[in-house]
Image: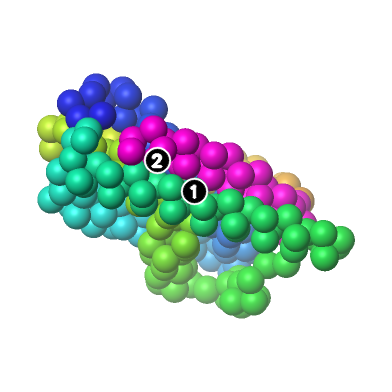
Amino acid sequence: MRDCGVHQVVGAVLPFALVVTVSPVNIVAAILLLFSERRILAASAYLVGFAVGVAAVLVALELLAAEVDLSAGSDGSHAAAVVRIVLGGAFLLAATRKVRARRHDAGGGELPGWMDGITSFGPGKAAATGVGIGAGNPKNVAMAVAASLAIGAAGLPAAQVAGVIALYVVIASLGVAAPLVVAVGLGDRSEPVLTSWRDWLGRNNDVVMAVLYFVFAAVLVGNGIASL
């Protein structure tokens, strides 16, 4: 993929950003903050923190990828192919576990326990939470690894790499931004909408993630095999 056009790289990383943006945990945290006392400020701080966390991980990984020769046929390229296959296998395993969890929990999924007190967070703690989820959510990190390999293999100039990373961060943050846009646009009328989103995501977390995991397991394993 070395020296391919920037539009090809965007096409390669866009699916990974979409996985991040539809991840229920990322979105539910934003929704819960919109039930806090300073809801708009807290949710805005969370959004900024989330974007910073996502960007920090991708930039760090891309700096590492830039030090490795990922051109076709190189040892680095073969190693990257193995990483893609391993990531794909991990997603396949995670999808299988999500399906099993769904079968054993007919009532739907549950939110992480740490979210119980999130409605009491102020802007500072909300921003820190955003950074933590953006940089620490395993799904976000896995997608950043896959995206950094695609970017690193392309041989793009630094300015174009920065542009691709910025676009990735924007797309990855859309899911977190959506509840805030609804809250600002609808004001007090947003509460029932946000409540329905929160409940739906809580009930269907396992289904949403299982489907995404299966799809990207196939994509990553296929890409990895093709690159060997």
Residue at point 82%, 59% (across, down): 103
Residue 166 lies, with reference to residue 8, above or below; the image says below
Say which quarter of the image contains residue 147.
top left
Residue 178 coordinates in the image, percent (x, y): 56, 44
Residue at point 38%, 62% (across, down): 135
Give the side of residue 149 with respect to residue 42, left or right.
left
Say which mark, if any, is on residue 224: 2
Say which mark, if any, is on residue 88: 1
Q: Secondary structure at mark 1?
A: helix
Task: Give the extent of the magenta segment.
Answer: 199-228
Residue at point 28%, 44% (across, down): 78
Q: Earlier in the sequence, mark 2 or mark 1?
A: 1
Q: Is 8 part of what is drawn in magenta?
A: no
Q: Secondary structure at mark 2?
A: helix
Q: Dot 2 surroundings within 10 Å: few (below 14), some, or many (20 or more)?
A: many
Residue 137 coordinates in the image, percent (x, y): 47, 63
Residue at point 23%, 24% (across, down): 4
Q: Is 222 part of what is drawn in magenta?
A: yes
Residue 173 lies, with reference to residue 60, above or below; the image says above
Q: Quadrant of the N terminus?
A: top left
| Dominant SS in magenta | helix
Q: How many marks overall?
A: 2
Q: Dot 1 surroundings within 10 Å: few (below 14), some, or many (20 or more)?
A: many
